[in-house]
Amino acid sequence: MSGFLAVLVVVLIFIVIFQIAKASEYVSVLKGEKKAREQSNRINGFLLIAFLVLGLIGVYYCNDLLKGKILGESASVQGEGVDTLIYVTLAITGIVFVITQILLFWFAFKYQEKEGRKAFYFPHNNKLEVIWTVIPAIALTVLVAFGLKHWFQLTSDAPKDAQVVEVTGKQFNWIFRYPGKDGQLGRRDFKDIDPGAGNELGMDWNDPLNKDDFMPTEVHLVVGKPVKFIIGSRDVIHDVGLPHFRMKMDAVPGIPTTLWFTPKYTTKQMKEKTGNADFTYEISCDQMCGSGHYSMRGVIVVETQEEFDAWAAKQKSTYSLTHADTAAPAGAPKADSTQKVVAAVTK
Amino acid sequence: MSNEATLHSQQEVMHGAHDHHDHEHHHEDSFISKYVFSMDHKMIAKQFLITGIVWAIIGAFFSVLFRLQLGFPDATFPWLESILGHWAKGGRITAEAYYALVTMHGTILVFFVLTAGLSGTFSNLLIPLQVGARDMASPFMNCLSYWFFFLASLVMMASLFVQTGPASGGWTMYPPLSALGDASIGSKIGVDLWLTSMALFVVSQLLGGLNYISTILNMRTKGMAMTKMPLTIWSFFFTAILGVLSFPVLLSGFILLLMDRHAGTSFYLSDIFIAGKALANEGGSAILYQHLFWFLGHPEVYIIILPAMGMVSEVLAVSSRKPIFGYLAMIGSLFAICILAFLVWAHHMFVTGLNPFLGAFFVLLTLLIAVPSAIKVFNWITTIWKGNINFTPASLFSIGFVSTFISGGLTGIWLGNSSIDIHLHDTMFVIAHFHIVMGVSAFFGMFAGIYHWFPKLYGRFMNSTIGYIHFWVTMVGAYLIFWPMHYEGMAGMPRRYYDVSNWASFKQFGGLNEFITIVVILVFAVQLLFVFNFFYSIFKGRKMTTKNPWHATSLEWTTPIHAGHGNWPGEIPEVYRWAYDYSKDGRDFIPQTEPIGPNEEVH
């Protein structure tokens, strides 16, 4: 019923607008086309300049309203460069935006049709055209140079001592794997994936490097220590999005990718800095991956070295969890732990 | 170059159309040949336009539906269940339906509305009329072009009604998501129908595009040198070249995808474990598809925006009574954009793991496009400078076009710089950017074209009061919708999220999303007002009493008000000058058909 009423109201408004529009057409015929034209030009000219003024105020107001809601300072060392580049680009494009919009609407207002005004025949002017070819070209050269400097830094190889974390996307969550004490990830093959046996990644149990690899449900990182993500996917393309660290990289099945960064603040520090007790570093999936795309949330905890070591010491290797029967034939703990891993991994 | 000979066979037809009471050529007057399988470019233009409008309503309505979900994730709308059935159980759109709506919104608007509806309409209408030709080089191919588009439309429409729903992997249709039925319900029969429809669409585009190019190159009237053509024609020309060179690449990508789906090949598939089992496919590259897709996908955005640019140039010159400033620079920048359009596709792929060294070239070439774009903007602004502007709905939409093109173009400089793109890639910032620059701008160009050439199409005017309301609400609404969206992107909020309320980093925008949704509904309602105005004016609009209502110089206004097939009843007029002699030598305008005076300076 309320839906019907809503439709009725809309239709009525339509009819009213339409009647006014029809009437104004008749009025303009009565008043004479010339007079109607003058009037409509005056109104629209005024609206154009009003749009400019209110629009620029709106831009300022919008910024005032929303600037607190976007991310603060970059939480990674590498992200600082991205932020600087954003500010430089914002300054350049902001200036161009304001100038060109003012000129556009001001000219439109100022040179609206007036009795007796003659338009100025001005087909071209080489000097002007050279000026506005060269100035944008210079500005863009600066932006390209500056941008590429950061681009090569961001995409450079990770430092040798970087912490390695493997991140694998699947519909619809992330699987994390740490190399364990030996610092090396073991071999895996997608054909060996067997979620029923707790082997979500197809780890090759004959590879000794796999024996100490562990798979937590959250990523833990050490503040100030570079970390390298080795990124892959098990099914469709996903994307590891790290907005606080200004990082992003696709997870492509069959083609491993990497990214690296150095976290600057612990989660605790960020909670204080932002004044938000619920602050969490999140991993978002940024590449459309199916119906659960929006729920592919991962959590990163950045902490001090001591906290990290304590956490890492508590992690059980996936091998020990999945091979509980060979290690300890007792029934109850095995079923329990396997379930836990499976539950953690498939969520 | 004379088209008299080429069109000899059409002379008869032309005479028949010239005299409406003359029934000796009644094969031409039959309903089917006049309104359905018409070979008159003007009728085909109308067919493209009206089909485009129907698609635009559907596509825009889809955006209203998914904006309802985004703005009010916890609310239920029982009426949704009555139109969408189990796709909106309990009045809340399901995630599957949400993604299907998003995907179809993109596909419909990009291809069916802003490619076929925009360039299909105005290339067809204006090319023969403005270059001085009786019709296209091949009217039959032109007719086929529309009917292939119609077939593509039917197949796409059918896909909306299949049990498993239409394609839902995003309008870019990236594999493996689109290749595997197990990955998404929309990737079952929906993707097959999508690919079939798009293949038919590519055929339509190629038939149309080749026709546009050959007509422009071969069928210009006497005196119509390339450098005397209006900028609209130049823009349609470059648009057609872009389409002809890039659509086949897209088709090849689609064929490989179809083979991966049904023939067991592994072009895009490798190392996949899905639905509880590992697939046999190995060695394929999912990234290969993206290269093939964006090799069209990027030129595609220029296919959309160039015709709008051309029409805006024309409308701004006519309504400010001034020549377009820097005509040759305008052509040069169109040419530069056309070339660069082919060399920037990988800027959509900066975060795919692309070689950073290769990425650097794409940064350079991408930002280079800003130079010709800047030239165009400055030239438009200079065109209205010291003019005498009459604010028709068409000229307002043209001014709006320049404004949104600036706003959306500038954020392109952000995204084209790969370092910034890492942060903003696939966030709402991108949505804001391309909706302003190729959604809103292209629509503004299209509206400008419709209001301006409506008298040419139907011999009547559209109601300008509704036109003004349409413009102002759309202009304000577009900025209210998309401007704040940049901030969501700056916060890293990803695009294509069904619900953000579980995210600590993005949920602060709940109120903003509600606001945007409300504005979307309002703007959508005003577009319906436009649609009403359009159809009402076809039958009841104020009648055109003179041939040249806008006092324009170009050739299309020299034809009779209701021109028959063949456009000019007698000889095709000869052209002596360019199309922009406004306010020259103290005269308001000098038509292209007027010979250069003895003491006149030639542009």
Image (cartoon, coloured by chain):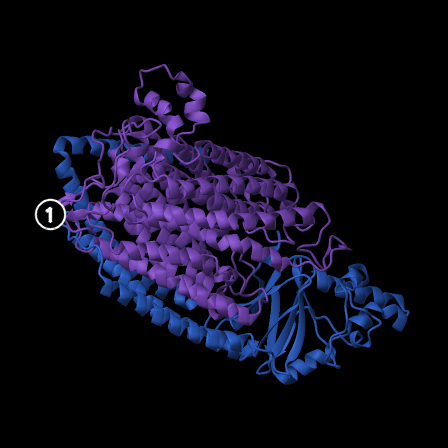
Chain colours: A blue, B purple
Residue indicated by mark 1: B586
User: Most extreme residue toward the left, as rendered?
Assistant: A116
What residue is rendered at 31% in x and 69% in y?
A: A135
B127 displayed left or right of A177: left
Instruction: Please state if B277 lies on the left or on the right of B556 as rendered.
Output: right
Q: Position of residue B193 (x, y in %)?
A: 61, 40
Q: What is the number of callouts on the image?
A: 1
Placement of B178 over or under B347, stated as above or below: above
> Can residue B515 be seen in this snapshot?
no
Q: Is residue B168 left or right of residue A84?
A: right
**Quadrant into which the N terminus of chain B falls:** top left
Q: Is residue A15 visible?
A: yes
Number of other residues with Cα within 10 Å of mark 1, as a class: few under 14, some 14 to 19, many 20 or more: few
Q: Residue at x 74, y 75 (%)?
A: A185
> Along the line of sight, which residue is nearer the eye, A308 or B231?
B231
Q: Quadrant of residue A334?
A: bottom right
Front residue of B201/B338: it is B338
Q: What secondary structure is marked by label 1?
A: loop
Up/down of B194 relative to B406, above or below: above
Q: Tell whether A96 sits left or right of A5.
A: left
Q: Chain of mark 1?
A: B
Q: In the rendering, at what x and y percent does residue A242 appear? A: 55, 69
Q: Quadrant of residue B157?
A: top right
Query: Where residue A267 appears, x then y in whole percent?
Result: 56, 76
Q: Position of residue B87 (x, y in %)?
A: 59, 41
- In this view, the residue in front, A219 or B45, is B45
Name above or below for residue B152 compared with residue B186. above
Q: Quadrant of residue B266?
A: bottom right
* Amino acid type assigned to the residue bearing label 1 in the image: Gly
As drawn, B74 above or below A7? below
